[in-house]
Image: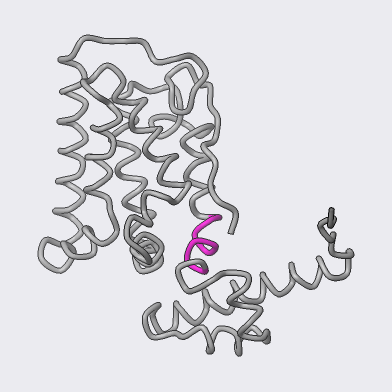
């Protein structure tokens, strides 16, 4: 049986440096020219790596988008798991849900083009991203006690899809989108309050008891 080859330390260090160079170059070019206007050839040239290296490591621009968003997603996840209320544990579920919607919208608007690319690269890509499973699990727990909280969480998150928000920005503007999303979160919380309560399982992501476990995201 052929054993998998472990790259020597120098090769691993070179790969790590190349990854940082590519991500720095991509972030700079995307900020200067917009995501759609930048090619993989331009990113490879700016990073000083071969195009083959770039494609092997990231696949395509959508893969680059996921890698660039990884740190931003981790920051928001950390705030949800361990940050102060109402985004973090310690507040009522309704307050946490409204806080999450606002915080996620802030993150989405800051990185709209990148999130949109990562979610629409292939049909259904949004739902295969590990971060989406984290957001869905968190919202479903906050809606625990409502009829079918898993479905309700998907429905609420549909209003936060990057493609959907991008389409509404020009017509409605940020303020109306934000107000509408907060109203939607409040309506879902009210639906939950009117339904028979069932206790959240102890020690899970987003529970008011403060326990937590990160739902895995794919490493970029």
For residue 111, above or below residue 213: below
Name the side, left or right, on which 197 lies relative to 14. Answer: left
Q: Is residue 69 magenta?
A: yes
**Based on the displayed image, in which of its 4 quarters is residue 162 positioned?**
bottom left
| Segment colored magenta | 64-71
Percent across and percent down for residue 57 are 63, 70
* Residue, far front: 1
Most extreme residue toward the left is 171
Q: Nearer the viewer, residue 52 or 27?
A: 52
Say whether residue 46 is left or right of residue 139. Answer: right
108 in magenta: no
Asked whether, in this view, residue 140 is left or right of residue 81, the answer is left
Image quarter hosting the C terminus: bottom right
Residue found at x 42% / y 50%: 128
Say left or right for 120 vs 77: left
Instruction: Give the percent coordinates (x, y) of residue 74.
Output: 54, 47
Q: Position of residue 97 (x, y in %)?
A: 31, 32
């Amino acid at each position: 049986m052929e054993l998998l080859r472990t790259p020597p330390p120098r090769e691993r260090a070179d790969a790590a440096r190349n990854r940082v160079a590519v991500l720095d170059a991509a972030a700079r070019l995307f900020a200067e020219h917009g995501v759609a206007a930048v090619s993989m050839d331009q990113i490879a040239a700016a990073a000083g790596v071969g195009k083959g290296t770039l494609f092997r490591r990231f696949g395509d621009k959508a893969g680059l988008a996921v890698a660039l968003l990884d740190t931003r997603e981790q920051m928001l996840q950390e705030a949800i798991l361990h940050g102060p209320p109402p985004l973090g544990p310690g507040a009522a579920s309704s307050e946490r849900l409204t806080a999450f919607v606002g915080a996620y919208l802030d993150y989405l608007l800051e990185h709209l083009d990148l999130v949109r690319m990562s979610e629409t690269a292939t049909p259904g890509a949004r739902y295969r991203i590990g971060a989406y499973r984290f957001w869905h699990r968190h919202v479903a727990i906050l809606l625990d006690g409502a009829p079918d909280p898993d479905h309700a969480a998907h429905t609420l998150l549909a209003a936060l899809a990057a493609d959907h928000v991008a389409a509404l920005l020009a017509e409605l503007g940020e303020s109306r989108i934000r107000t509408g999303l907060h109203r939607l979160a409040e309506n879902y919380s009210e639906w939950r309050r009117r339904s028979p309560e069932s206790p959240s399982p102890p020690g899970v992501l987003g529970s008011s008891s403060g326990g937590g476990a990160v739902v895995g995201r794919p490493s970029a």
